[in-house]
Image (cartoon, rainbow, N blue to C red):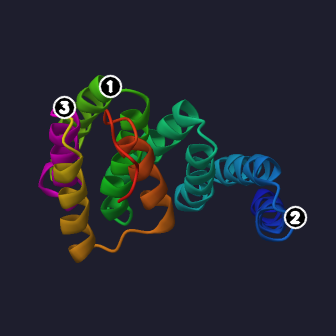
Amino acid sequence: GRFTIAARHHITIAEVYESELLDIEKAIAHYEQAADYYKGEDSKSSASKCLVKVGFYCAQLEQYQKAIEIYEQCGTNSMDDPLMKHNAKEYFFKAALCHFIVDELNAKLALQKYEEMFPAFSDSRECKLLKKLLEAHEEHNSEAFTEAVKEYDSLSRIDQWLTTMLLRIKKTIQGDEGDL
C-alpha cells in the first residue's frame, strides 16, 4: 500500500544521505522512518533490513545502547520467523559486540541471555568467538584476542564494521597498542 511506497522513498533518501551527502545522522532518521512504515504494513523483513542499517550506523557512531536495542529486536523477530531465522545469530552477535565495547560483564550476561533465547546461537562460530574474546579480555591477553580473531577470519571474512568494533574492544585490554 501507500506505506510501502513511502517507506521506499525514505530508503532512497537515506541512501542519498549515506553515500552522496555523507550525513549519517539523517540517513539513520530516514531508515527509521522507512522501518516504521514497513511495520505499519506488517512487512517485518523489510522493516528489519532498515533497522539493521540503523544499528550498523549507531554502533559506528558509538550510540551502542540504541544499536543493542535494535539488534536485539531484529534478533528476536528473526528467530520466530522460519525465513529469517538464519539472521538471528548475526544480530545477537552484533548486539553482544556492542555490549562488549561498553562493558565486559554486560557482554557476558547478554551472551547467556541470547543463548537461552536462541539455543542455535550457542553452536555458532560467532558465539564461540565471543567466548574466546571474553576470556582473552578477562586475562588481559591481547595475543589470545588477536589469535581468536585470526581463527574466525580464516572461516568467515571480517568486514570493515566488525574490524572497527573488534579494535574498539581490543583497545580496552590494558596496555594494548590497538592493532588486529
Say left or right for 42 vs 25.
left
Q: Is residue 154 above or below residue 89?
A: below
**Mark 1 to mark 2 CA distance (whole Å):** 36 Å
Amino acid type of the residue that numbered disc 3 sits on in the rendered structure: Glu
Query: In which quadrant will I find the C terminus?
Result: bottom left
**Residue that label 3 marks:** 138
- The answer to whether residue 80 shows anywhere in this view is no
- Based on the displayed image, in which of its 4 quarters is residue 13 positioned? bottom right
Residue under the point 43% across and 60% down: 163
- Residue 49 is situated, as x and y percent measured from the top left of the image, at 57, 60
- Residue 96 is situated, as x and y percent measured from the top left of the image, at 35, 40
**Residue that label 2 marks:** 21
Residue under the point 40% across and 41% down: 171
Q: Which mark is residue 106?
A: 1
Residue under the point 42% across and 36% down: 101
Amino acid type of the residue that numbered disc 2 sits on in the rendered structure: Leu
Residue under the point 52% across and 60% down: 45
**Mark 3 to mark 2 CA distance (whole Å):** 41 Å
Viewer-side residue, 61 vs 32: 61
